[in-house]
Amino acid sequence: MSGHSKWHNIQKTKGAQDAKRAASFTKIAKEMIVAVKEGGSADPNNNSRLATVITKARAANMPNDNIKRVLEKAAGAGSGENYESITYEGYGPGGVAVLVEAMTDNRNRTAGSVRHHFDKFGGNMGASGCVSWSFDRKGVLVIDNEDEDYEEDTVMMDAMDSGADDFEAEESCFTIYTSPDDFNAVADALTAKGYKFASAQLEMVPQNYQKLDKEEDKTNMEKMLDLFEDDDDVQNVWHNWERD
C-alpha cells in the first residue's frame, strides 16, 4: 500500500459531508434502494451489497430509524425509483486522476453536469478506462484514534485475525484494507470486538498519489471536488491527489 495517508486525503471531503449530513444520508439511502432492487432482498443477511451499504450508513452515524424506513420503502412495490449506476473518468487540474461514481434516473442530465464540473475548473472528462486502471477496488475501514484509545499492535492483530489484507497506522487513525468480497465479514468481526468506524465502505484506492505544486491548481481542485460533492447524482468521488 502507498505510504501516503488515505484518510488524510478524504478528511476534508468527510468534513464537508458532515456539514451536510442530510444530503449525505440521502445519497446513502439511494445506494440502499439500488442494493435492494439489484440484490432482490431487503434483508442484509441475504444481500451482501446491502450489508455493505448498511455498514457504510452506520459509520456515517445514520440513525437506525432512518435505515429501517429506507429498507421498508425499498421493499415496497411502489417505491418507484429507477436509478442506474454510472462511473465517469477524467482528469483534474495538473492531471490528477478522478473517478466519479453516480446514481441517476436521467443519464443525459448527469453526464452533462459531470462534464461541466470537470471543465469549470480546468479538468476534462475522459473516455471510459482512461484512469480506472490506476485504482484498485478495496474495502476500507477507518478507526479514529485521535484520543489514543487503541494500541497499534492490538488493532493490527485484531484486523489481521478478522481477515484483513493490509493495515496502516496514521498519526490519529488506523486504516484497514480488505478485498471487496471479505469487507462485510471483516467489518462484522471487528464490530464484534467493540470497534467503531469513522468510515467504512468500498473505495477505489489509487495505486499512486500525485502532488500539485501550483496554488491555483490546488484551489481549482478543491472547488471541483466541492462541485461533485454538492451534485445530488454523484455518490462518490475518488482521486489520487495527495493534499499537503
Image (spheres, rainbow, N blue to C red):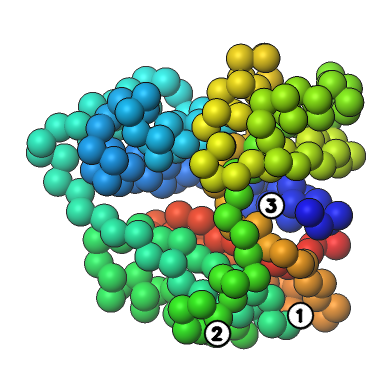
* Residue drawn 84% across the image and 21% down it: 154
Secondary structure of the residue carrying numbered label 1: helix
| Amino acid at the residue labelled 1 | Glu
Q: CA distance from mark 2 to mark 1?
A: 16 Å
Q: Quadrant of the N terminus?
A: bottom right
Question: Relative to 180, does residue 87 appear above or below in the rendering?
Answer: below
Residue indicated by mark 1: 216
Residue indicated by mark 2: 124
Q: Quadrant of the C terminus?
A: bottom right
Question: Relative to 93, does residue 173 appear above or below in the rendering?
Answer: above
Q: Position of residue 17 (x, y in %)?
A: 56, 46
Residue indicated by mark 3: 10
Q: Which mark is residue 99?
A: none
Secondary structure of the residue carrying numbered label 3: helix
* Residue drawn 79% across the image and 36% down it: 174
Image check: 158 left or right of 32?
Answer: right
Q: Position of residue 202 (x, y in %)?
A: 55, 46
| Amino acid at the residue labelled 3 | Ile
Question: Which is closer to the viewer, label 2 or label 1?
Answer: 2
Front residue of 61/77: it is 77
